[in-house]
Amino acid sequence: MLQVSTTWTHSSLLHSYDSHGGGRSLLEQGVRVSLAGAWLPEFENEKVTIRGQPDEDAVLCTLSSTYSMKFVGTSNSVFLIPPGDSSANGEKSSSVAASIITVATGNIELILAAPKLDKLKKLLKETPYNPDEDFDSISTHKKGLFRWQDLVEMIQASEEEIRAALKSLSAVEIDGYWRIVDDKTMNKTLTMILRNSLLHDWLISALDEETVLSTMVADGFSPRIVAHCLETHGTKVHDSKGTLWELGEKQVCLRLALDILASGKMKLKSFLERWEQSVPSGMKADLKMLQGEVLCDKIGVEEWIRVFSVSALPSTPADRFSALFQERLKWEWKDLEPYIRDIHVPGLSSEGLLMKYTRRIQPNAEAEPIFSAR
Amino acid sequence: MQIRVKCNCGEGECREWAIIEVQGTVESQPSIEEHLHDHEIGRLCCISEGNYTFTIGYHELSGTKMRLKKPFLVLRKKNVETVGDSNSSVELHVVGIIRHRILFKTRPKALISSKNIAFYMFDEIPHKTTATELVHISCRAAD
């Protein structure tokens, strides 16, 4: 009996070829793989790869999707027969010989799965970019720095999923390496852009890229980081005069709020005061913008606010829920929802997700449901 | 690390392979254990659209051809020497696709019973069918 564990070691995959057939005179050995026919064309583009480190469960990735691979054994005898010689169909009565080249002991089943992206977050957070770093010494060690090619080798997700994750992490490619810019640098850069727009009467809904860059560089900022800051907090608008950037209200307000809360929890009232003061004119701060980023707790009569960011939580459902229930024993739906809306498990609806990982308590039909750990 | 899965079938369709699936195992007589190559295992006959019989020795199995819900790909492992790199990497090549299988899931029917030929059939499922008779068939042919 062939043992192929789903844990992928280099040899276990090969094993399914080698151990089968027992080295007898069977001509060749193969392994069956089941897959949905829909993405067959991707094989021709050589865009299908199996990814994983020796201690990880292997996954198969197309350009856009990730599939888990599971070896499913069978107790039946499955004879594999390659296409025969078509020249033998001359006479009707003559029998045609078909050769069995191997007996398959099972097949590898592919199941659409969620990409494993926590590792990407972890890797990039090891060495966040800051402009004062000694790049030469970091790059000679190459520790904590990853090129696109490194990420593709290490992350068990499709290329499209990795790109989307890099974008949602606000990662940027600097000198060929994908980096996360540290919060301090981003805060400083954005504050300076806002200050300059006050100083020079720029419209924050239409910042001229060239002007911003040249002014900021004169202030000692790196053009790459300024451009990244505009990209993260705004949207590009093309105009006849050049590239314009419109700063997004939500992104800017969120950044300013997190900056205020960076030193620790605050009384909600004083936080709101400071926040509203810091927000540039033309923008309006609203607590709704902070969903999934902060939590408010009532302690006595006072309400306190603190940072609790969804991006810092694990992305697998079981780990996510356990982290959430570690934070709070009971969750109201309106608080919980921002922390689970990014979880998508193929084949499981959000109701199914809640049923699987939470206990729902609703004293009466009108009351808000409360969720606790199972 | 990555293992690339390649298909060299080009624009055309992949070559279609077939599966014959039998419940239990087919065993060869110990004397031919070492010389399995080119031995006839049995005869497959299409008796009507989609229905087949598979005769192994004095056992006849009946089965049906069915479409696989998900097709299978047949892959072959290939060691690839990369230039300037001493360790060779592995690639998987698609050599065929399987869309149908002929499944024999019924208990075999004995065609003739003869005391001269020793074969074993076990009552429990999965049952065993010996291919001892093969030897006799090929011996007779040789005679």
Image (cartoon, helix red, strand yellow):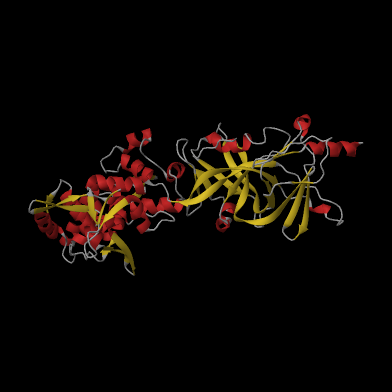
Q: Is residue A229 above or below residue A10?
A: below
Q: Position of residue A105 (x, y in %)?
A: 62, 41
Horizontal side, residue A161 vs residue A302: left or right: right
Horizontal side, residue B4 vs residue B142: left or right: left
In the image, A10 versus A206, the foreground residue is A10
User: For the point 73% across and 43% down, which residue is it?
Assistant: A100
In the image, A205 versus A39, the foreground residue is A39
Q: Position of residue A128 (x, y in %)?
A: 30, 42
Give the quadrant of residue A243: bottom left
Residue A181 in sight: no
User: For the point 74% across and 61% down, which residue is it?
Assistant: B49
Horizontal side, residue A317 vs residue A333: left or right: right
Give the quadrant of residue A132: top left
Q: Position of residue B89 (x, y in %)?
A: 56, 37
Q: Position of residue A334 (x, y in %)?
A: 24, 59
Of the 4 image quadrants, the one containing the N terminus of chain A is: top right
Q: How many marks?
A: 0
Give the quadrant of residue A363: bottom left
Residue placed furthest toward the right: B143
